[in-house]
Amino acid sequence: MAEVDLKAIQRKVTAGASYRKMIAAAEAGQPICLASAGIPNEVMHAMGVYPVYPESLAAISAGIGKAGVFFDEARTRGLTNTICSYTRCGLGISWTKQTPFGPIPPPNIAVTDVNMCCLHLTWWAHIEDHLKLPTCYMDMPATDAPDAPEYIDYYENQVLEMVRFIETNTPCRLDMDKLRASVKHSDLAGYYWTKMMELRRNRPSPISFRALAGQILPLVTALGEPDTSDYYEALYYQYAQDAKEGKTPAHGGEKYRLIWNGIPIWHHLQLIDYFQEKGANFVWEPYTSLTWGNKTSSGRLDLDRPFHTLAEKYTNILSNKPIARRFEYFDRAIRDYAVDGLVMFSNRSCRPMSIGQHQLGQLIKERHDDLPILIFEGDQADPDGFSWDDARTRIDGFIEVLEGRKT
Amino acid sequence: MIAQFKALFDARHEKARELKQQGTKIIACFYALPPKELVHAAGMLPVQMVEDRDSKYEARSEFLPYLCGMSKNLDGQIGAGVFDYVDGIMVSTVCDTNRHVLDIWAQQKTFPHAWLVRAPAKNDEGAVNYFTKELKRLAHELGTVSGTRVTDEGLRRSIALFNENRSLFRQFYEARVRAGIPAEDAVYVFASALTTPVEEHNALMKTLLSSLPSDRPNVEPKLMLCALNIPMSVDVIRLAEKYGATVVTDDFTHNARYGSTEIVADGDPFRALARGYLRSVPAPGLYSFEDRAAGIRAAMERAGATGMIYLTQLYCDAYAFEYAVLKERFERWKLPHLRLDAEATPGSIEQLNVRVQSFIESLL
């Protein structure tokens, strides 16, 4: 690959850049869509619709300590703290029409999936009801067999329905050439992302989970854009070079290789830094390796069957698989990535990711020589009740256990 | 006569064990959305798992602390062997908790069989087609377990029986106010329907309806109770009565299911069942908020209720969220209501004392 300026490319895909693109899109008359994470944004990009993701904005707001105002708004509207913090913060953003970067333009439509979590359905029904927005529900029945052909076919029809919905409710029309181009850029982004994840098999792994928590944003919100695929291509080559040079984010060299199970704790990402300070490095996470990217059986998107390939990708949801199948991914990762320990984030906001963790942990311990597991309980975006001191003490104890196994 | 319903409900486990001994297979349902007609048509007894007041069950559960008390309570009951008669469990999604605790039960092989009902969230033709096929898949698997194949004719008969139950419920709700039926008794009329063979419940309901008194006055103010957890509801009813109010009607997703929409069983009965369940059950997100709010208001008007208590269980995000949406309408309509959020323990309910008292006084 020709030498590229990674920082220059990165500046095009940051959260701030994404915000500025949204404003420019609205000013240019592009429809703005309130979208849930996990819908085929390749199609939106191809059709000229600009998606705004309340969940991503919630994560970003929490990450920079600016979510409080949105939680307050949600509380005054009757949402209790036991409801998912993405939902509360995301609705706070929708109600206040603000983001940490500035105001959001009035949305024209809303689109959601209904199966990644049940709250998406109620959340977008609330948006439809409250904001009176034309809303498209990408139906994905609850399932424990997400790779069943009839299931993927059903969702493929939902993708086609989304196209009809956009054409009915906006001036945008689908151009198949643009869709193929969009899917191609998405495929490339996913391809380079996967190659990045594979670099983490290196000892030491050159990649920091803390950095990935930010770098994953375009993979969630901007698939289809050439900037996104350019970014991941450049990032991959940078990390490949780092791997060659034996770089690692773990201080004093990589002593312990870990798995993180769950969404990052956005309000205390310095938790990951603290692991790194202790010589520990996260080398695999379902969140980075299985939740986003090209999730088809071949690992690539089929440009000749864009709707079907998107259906296969977006129906492949880890939490819809039985616990025994989820274990298989961990089992393989523990061996392939030479893992020393596992950190589970028991996230009170995300029940699909948290329910079954205990049973998963038991399987892992049984099959992997009592692999050490540290469990944090807390919330992905709401810092209420989280104790940094307590977290550090627990990490210290966990590191001692890992060290004990090394000696 | 009405006391028989409570007796039936209280003896639900003994009754199920008795039937099991006689050769009937029992299929447990978590929450009200599994198509019980299908289980019935396969020659088995659908029994809803209902939370128990005894808090020892919650302590016994190994579920995450931030899951609702209902799921923890049921898991504790399972661990204690309360549902030792169950041959299989069927879950249809209403929230992430009820859907994913099934993963745990399936992994642990808690029951010999476990089914997740793969129900769409829409009710258009594509969704009905998909769900019809899903119901046929389930029917085949249920038939394999019971040894009784689900036929079109058998399913039509089962639909007719459950429709009759729904119709009887509608009549009961129309009659209960003028008959002055104590709210606690009314709770057990529907609670027993969740755990009793439909034929037996229908027969009891007919006897009840023919024997109800008329023109028995209710004490003012009259209230409606919207809730989910049965033991918690009984506690709140007692609290309301303690401060001089009468709960004259209620709305549980369970009884709304039985009492709202009958399944139009013409043509393919599987397809009819699919249509009957998709977006027809008043569950959060799976039913129009407008219809749900209007339904509550209409029920209050029919019963002459001047206030409503909306009771949610702590960590039940589905109903906590639903309330936030309905609240906008309740406020717009100036519908006097009190939202209570509590754990399912007597101590937790007792703490609501002052709020219930103040609310009732505000209605006088």
Image: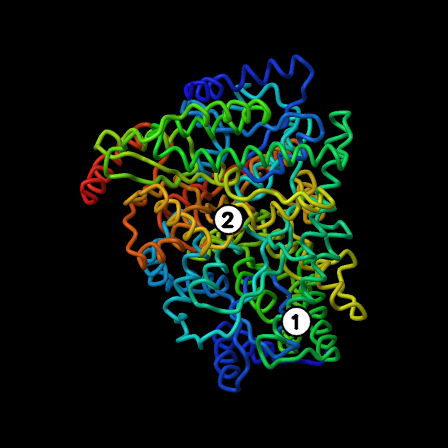
Residue A402 visible? The answer is no
All told, the count of numbered labels is: 2
Q: Is residue B17 left or right of residue A191?
A: left
Furthest toward the bottom, the residue is A28
Q: Residues within 10 Å of mark 2 (few under 14, many from 20)?
A: many
Q: How is the image coloured?
A: rainbow
Viewer-closest of B29 and B257: B257
Say what amino acid the circle numbered 2 marks: Cys
Question: Disc 1 versus disc 2: distance between alpha carbons?
Answer: 31 Å
Viewer-closest of B100 and A249: B100
Query: Is A151 above or below relative to A398?
Result: below
- The residue tagged 2 is A350
- The residue tagged 1 is A164
Q: Nearer the N terminus, badge 1 or badge 2?
A: 1
Q: Nearer the viewer, mark 1 or mark 2?
A: 1
Name the spot of residue B80 as percent of width and height, x first.
Answer: 52, 19
Q: Residue at x 72, y 65 (%)?
A: A191
Residue A265 visible? The answer is yes
Viewer-closest of A174 and B55: A174
Query: Is B130 above or below relative to A365?
Result: below
Q: Is residue B100 left or right of residue B233?
A: right
Name the spot of residue B53 as percent of width and height, x first.
Answer: 40, 25
Question: Considering the numbered disc 2 on the image, is that residue within a helix, a strand or a loop?
Answer: loop
Q: Chain of mark 2?
A: A
Query: Is B1 above or below relative to B321?
Result: above
Q: Chain of mark 1?
A: A
**Is the residue under label 2 in contact with that under label 1 (CB below 8 Å)?**
no
